[in-house]
Image (tube, coloured by chain):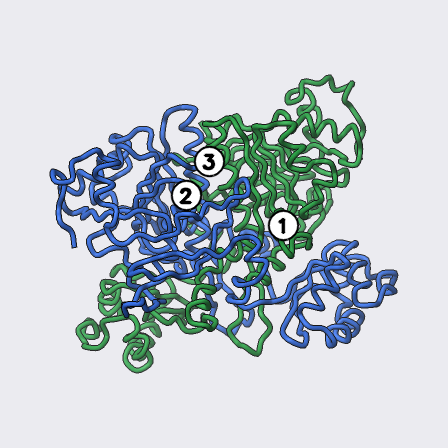
Chain colours: A green, B blue
Amino acid sequence: MPPLEGLLVIDLSRYIAGPYCTMLMADAGATVIKVEPPQGDDTRSLEPAVVSDRGAEVSTYFLRMNRGKRSIVLDLKDGDDRDLLERLIERADILVENYAAGVFERLGFGAQRVFELNPGIVYASISGFGHSASPMRDRAAYNIVAEYEAGVFFQRDPAAAPAPLGPPVGDMFPALHALSGLLMALHRKQRTGVGGRVDIAMYDSMLSLNELRSSYAMIYGEEWDPSAHPFYSPYGVFPVKDGHVCIDVTTSGQWEGFCSAIGRPDLFRMPGMETGPQRVERFEEIIKPPLDAWLSGQTRDSAVAGLTRHRVPCAAIRASGEALTSEQATAREMRVPVRGEDGVVVTTVGNPIKVDGANGQAAAAAPELDAHRDWVLKSVLGLGVVAAGKEHG
Amino acid sequence: MPPLEGLLVIDLSRYIAGPYCTMLMADAGATVIKVEPPQGDDTRSLEPAVVSDRGAEVSTYFLRMNRGKRSIVLDLKDGDDRDLLERLIERADILVENYAAGVFERLGFGAQRVFELNPGIVYASISGFGHSASPMRDRAAYNIVAEYEAGVFFQRDPAAAPAPLGPPVGDMFPALHALSGLLMALHRKQRTGVGGRVDIAMYDSMLSLNELRSSYAMIYGEEWDPSAHPFYSPYGVFPVKDGHVCIDVTTSGQWEGFCSAIGRPDLFRMPGMETGPQRVERFEEIIKPPLDAWLSGQTRDSAVAGLTRHRVPCAAIRASGEALTSEQATAREMRVPVRGEDGVVVTTVGNPIKVDGANGQAAAAAPELDAHRDWVLKSVLGLGVVAAGKEHG
């Protein structure tokens, strides 16, 4: 049985932070009803796009974050549609929204109203700076706003502008804090019958991600310099004939394995090289010359094979597409084709949460806008479609 | 009531991926028993360190990842201690380990044995490449190994070596997938009585984090270039008098707000500037000159205040220490003092998972090695301490 089978999730979220959270719930067997405004989730029209067989440009953004969900259009400025949302909230186990703080409340769905409708509901909000009182509460935020305010960015050259990391960590990391918080509150609800309110700030989440750097700054009074790893050696990225590999020696056993792998077991017995900081100190003089000599004859694959034989943590550095199409990704079922609007099918990244060997990606379609209206009205709300029917664009 | 109060978690994990997962459970009220080898978790001796009042060097690494847990030493190569672990597993709700795949099994605790001992247990393993059959299954992995193999790295200049992002996303992101998977399986257990096996690969988790980039590569056949954001404008990092700010205009309303904020409402009415791609195209010519002129008179705070008044998503770019000591971090209770070995107290980053307004950081001490041995034997296992007692270093 999929672990969340039988749960009804009402999903008012857009972009990534909410949708990634609820997609993982859909992968785990929950019934996720995505409530969209009349024009649909904004990401239905965002790049990158693919062209369907019939020549239509179809966004893949929406499709990548909304597989396995069902869609209904509700105009929350319309009284009848607000009533329908209230009925859905009454029946739901979980509610997720990622409006800016205060917006859902102004639409008539403050936490108080939500819990009046359903005291057992578990209700998560994901916002830039959280719903509790704080100086930044009302500011609009996308991922990089939360990242930069929390000190999460890439900057090696102090003269260069601080750069975003690349992956939208400011969305995806809080999505997982929200998912965890929802499931924690759900656990408590099964014992007490009482629901719970989960208040996730992308900003808090980024502070948590940044804890190594900020702790370092608090302890030493200066920012951590990621360009030199201060504690381990050999550590870093090195060129080989066809690209780069990384090597990450932490323990004494790994240091011994490294020395054997590069054909210099004598280095392991050299005094004054026992600890990481000692090896950091003497890396250029003692370690780098024989390492460079060894690597100059290696490819990514041969270097990784040679180091791995001696249990040295290492990696071939792979482009994104190469990684997703690798045999490893195949073996772990990390590619899933998802069908979207106008029949397009796109390969997306699978579910990393495996429970009892299953990753629950059977229902791999992202819904067309309002596709499940009749089903929601009839099967979830028990309404006659004619009585409740309203036309939506 | 803290959401996970009453749950017993046996934690055999080290470094970050496991300990961050179980720390969030401790923050949420679970009883987490950290099982350590006789020499303790390796991170008890890793930098960065602080000096105690008595002059001892105390690692902060352990302390930052293990607040609120209890410690017992068990030597898993010793028969009596293995028996004690079996008794703990019999009583536990949750088991977490992050040995390399196969190691815990060789110690006598394969999944089959664990479920024989306790069919209702929820058991998560976090490893580099997962426990199921795969080409990389048996490779040792730290965070950057999983990151690089999955295509997660920073590289703007194709001539420069690919760099790690900085925060250990390869540990912290899978920690949250594991936490979510554990709570999903726990939810199912409460309905079926049957436990579950959660198999998290840091590699899978990094593929998931990288989904924007890998999807882009799959669709367009080339790697995404993060140096130019292809869809939105104005977007990016800009200098002001005392540092940098970021601006992230996505919607038409934000574009209108931006034009008003910089004192050029006429730009909003200029034809051919309505869409993101149009503004990307004409940014240098049309937008950058008045933006630079406006920013040249601004500080981080004044620029953010001016843009925020018009609901433009923006951020002051803050160093890690500045962020963690900000009023915003204070308001969100994101600093927590944690007491560690030899009485040292260090400020660490608080819990981003807020349930019903609480973040559950009351028990903010990280345990001294083996500090809860008597308590575990007496109160958890119901044993007389003398009978079960063994001396450990």
Spatial separation of the CA atoms under disc 2 and disc 1? 25 Å
Spatial separation of the CA atoms under disc 1 and disc 3? 22 Å
Q: Position of residue B96 (x, y in %)?
A: 34, 43
Q: Residues within 10 Å of mark 2 (few under 14, many from 20)?
A: many
Identify the residue at image location x=31%, y=67%.
B53
Chain to which the residue tagged by mark 3 belongs = B
Do the residues indicated by labels 1 and 3 lie within the same chain of the protein? no
Q: Secondary structure at mark 1?
A: loop
Q: Secondary structure at mark 2?
A: helix
User: Label 3 sits on what residue type?
Assistant: Met
Residue beneath label 2, please? B25
Where on the picture, by quarter, is residue B344?
bottom left
User: Label 2 sits on what residue type?
Assistant: Met
Identify the residue at image location x=64%, y=71%.
B244
Q: Position of residue A161 (x, y in %)?
A: 60, 73
Where on the picture, by quarter, is residue A152?
bottom right
Q: Secondary structure at mark 3?
A: loop
Q: Pick whichever, A59 or B239, lies toward us.
A: B239
Q: Is residue B162 left or right of residue B379?
A: right
Chain to which the residue tagged by mark 1 belongs = A
Q: Position of residue A75 (x, y in %)?
A: 77, 35
Q: Are the residues at dot 1 and dot 3 in contact (C-beta closer than 8 Å)? A: no
User: Label 1 sits on what residue type?
Assistant: Ala
- Most extreme residue toward the bottom, as rendered? A285
Q: Nearer the viewer, mark 2 or mark 3?
A: 3
Residue beneath label 3, please? B1
Q: Nearer the viewer, mark 2 or mark 1?
A: 1
Residue beneath label 1, please? A133
Q: Position of residue B193 (x, y in %)?
A: 37, 24
